[in-house]
Image (cartoon, rainbow, N blue to C red):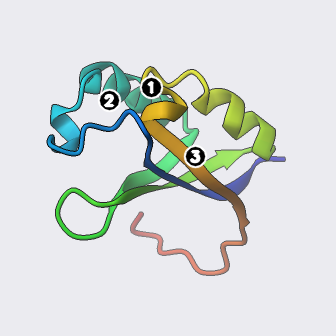
Amino acid sequence: MAAYYLVTRARGPAWDWSRRRREQAGWDEHAAFMDRLVEDGFVVLGGPVGAGDGERVLHVVRAETEEEIRARLADDPWGEDMLTTVSVEPWSVWLRSSRL
C-alpha cells in the first residue's frame, strides 16, 4: 500500500553556485523528468524551500517504500552530484484540505 514520504534534496558538489536553479546545466532535462514524476502521481507536491531560489528542495512523494523512491530518483538526469537526496522520511498525514 502506497504511503506518503517527505523527501529533502540539497545542492550537490556539481552545483554551479554562480547560477540560479533554472540556469543550471541540464535544467530542461531535470524539469522534464520531474514533470513525468508528477504526471505519474509519484511526486504530489514539490519545490525549493527558503528565500529566493531556496537552499534545498522538499517533495511530498507517494510510494510503497524508501527503496522505490531512491530508485526512481536515481534516474534524475541531474544525478546525486547535482541534487543530493538528504533524507527520505515516512509522513503520517493527519490533516488534509479538500482544496488540494
Q: Are marks 1 and 3 in contact (CB under 8 Å)?
A: no
Q: Earlier in the sequence, mark 2 or mark 3?
A: 2
Q: Nearer the viewer, residue 16 or 25?
A: 16
Asked which secondary structure carries label 2, the reply is helix
Per the image, the residue denoted by label 2 is 31
Name the quadrant containing residue 22: top left
Name the residue located 75 percent from the left edge and 35 percent from the top edge. Answer: 68
The image quarter containing residue 48 is bottom left
Q: Is residue 12 left or right of residue 28?
A: right
Whole-percent x, y for residue 95 in the image: 59, 80
Res. 36 mark: 1
Q: Who's the residue at 44% across and 53% down the image? A: 45
Residue 76 in the image, given as x and y percentages of width and height: 50, 25
For this view, does 50 lie left or right of residue 74?
Answer: left
Q: Amino acid at mark 2?
A: Ala
Secondary structure under tag 3 reads: strand
Q: Nearer the viewer, residue 29 or 100?
A: 29
Label 1 vs 3, first from the N-terminus: 1
Q: Which amino acid lies under the numbered mark 1 shown in the image of this protein?
A: Arg
The residue drawn where x is 67% and y is 80% is 94
Task: Tell how many labels.
Answer: 3
Q: Nearer the observer, disc 2 or disc 3?
A: 3
Dot 2 surroundings within 10 Å: few (below 14), some, or many (20 or more)? some
The residue at 59%/32% (across/down) is 73
Looking at the rendered image, the disc whose residue lies closer to the viewer, 1 or 3, is 3
> Which of the two discs, 2 and 1, sits closer to the camera?
2
Amino acid residing under circle 3:
Thr
Can you identify the residue that label 3 sits on? 85
Quarter of the C terminus within the rendering? bottom left
Q: Marks 2 and 3, how far apart in space?
A: 16 Å
Q: Which secondary structure, mark 1?
A: helix
